[in-house]
Image (tube, helix red, strand yellow):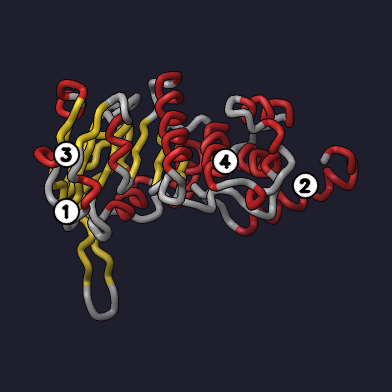
Amino acid sequence: MNGLQIKNVFFIYKTKYIDVVALKGVNMTLSPGEITVIMGPSGSGKTTLLNLLNGEIRPSSGQIIYNDQIYENFSFRDIQNFRKTKIGYMRQKENLFNFLTINDNFQLIADLIHRKISKEEIIEHLQKFDLGEKINVFPDQLSQGQQQKIAFLSILIKKPEIILFDEPTGNLDAESRDDFIRMIENYKEQDNDTIFVIVTHDPAFIAIADRVYFLKNGKVDTHLDKAEIIMNKTINLEKNIPNFGVNAFNLTISKEDLSRIETSIEVIQNFLRKLEKKHMKNPEST
């Protein structure tokens, strides 16, 4: 079966004195062309689940299967290559390297997947959101909203089959958040093969979701499919969502209203050496 299957997954953090069970028999279906939103209180296992999907950790038991390939059967090299070529991962912040310009952030990603990309192509990507003039600036010279938009665009360079988001709008104001949500929705409409997995506390994401899972104490507490989400174009969260003690859930949302790059120090150093040689040969290129 195509897509991601999470089958009876348990994950246990083992410490010297105590074992902490973060996930307890989680089952989910994450399909191509769908946006899956995962919500729940802090400590419910959301980020642990993303780290499992990203191949950073392995289940204590159960299986994660992608297009009939079982994650647990991957070697270390296989999972590194899978993450590098198939997965995009966006965190709440620090998705770009502050010591590289926007151009060089894009070039680093292209270099990691052995792809050449011209400065003109990068400007074309940025110009989709009127950010073409930011090509030579550093990330910390941009607003949080601009950084997140550019980080998302940079991930798309490798055309990932799976995009994971961990609280991507947690640091954004309402206007920037809405822009970012529309950006994801627009890309989904253009590309119906990507699996989108969004971990968030923000109920605004439900408006673009095809599935919503609510985690509580490491388990799936509630699951809503598309039909339940768009019920008469309005969902009453107070009736459909369990009480997690988060006031933001107790409201009505209408349809209308509504990785960091995983790499090693050695790879970055190699890239910087190449960059230095390039600039020494052609100082005007920057």
Q: Residues within 10 Å of mark 4 (few under 14, many from 20)?
A: some
Mark 4 secondary-structure assignment: helix
Q: CA distance from mark 3 to mark 1?
A: 12 Å
Q: CA distance from mark 1 to mark 2?
A: 49 Å
Image point (85%, 45%), residue name: 279
Residue 233 percent coordinates (x, y) = 21, 22
Which residue is identified by label 1?
244
Foreground: disc 4 or disc 2: 4
**Mark 4 or 1 closer to N-term?**
4
Which residue is identified by label 3?
237
User: Does any portion of residue 78 appear in the rendered image?
Assistant: no
* Rendered position, 251 above or below 25: above
Residue 75 percent coordinates (x, y) = 41, 49
Q: Are marks 4 and 2 in contact (CB under 8 Å)?
A: no
Q: Are marks 4 and 1 in contact (CB under 8 Å)?
A: no
Which residue is identified by label 2?
275
Q: CA distance from mark 4 to mark 1?
A: 32 Å
Which residue is identified by label 4?
146
For the view shown, which residue lies furthest in the left direction? 239
Residue 67 percent coordinates (x, y) = 32, 31
Q: CA distance from mark 3 to mark 4?
A: 31 Å
Type of the residue with mark 2: Leu
Image point (89%, 47%), residue name: 280
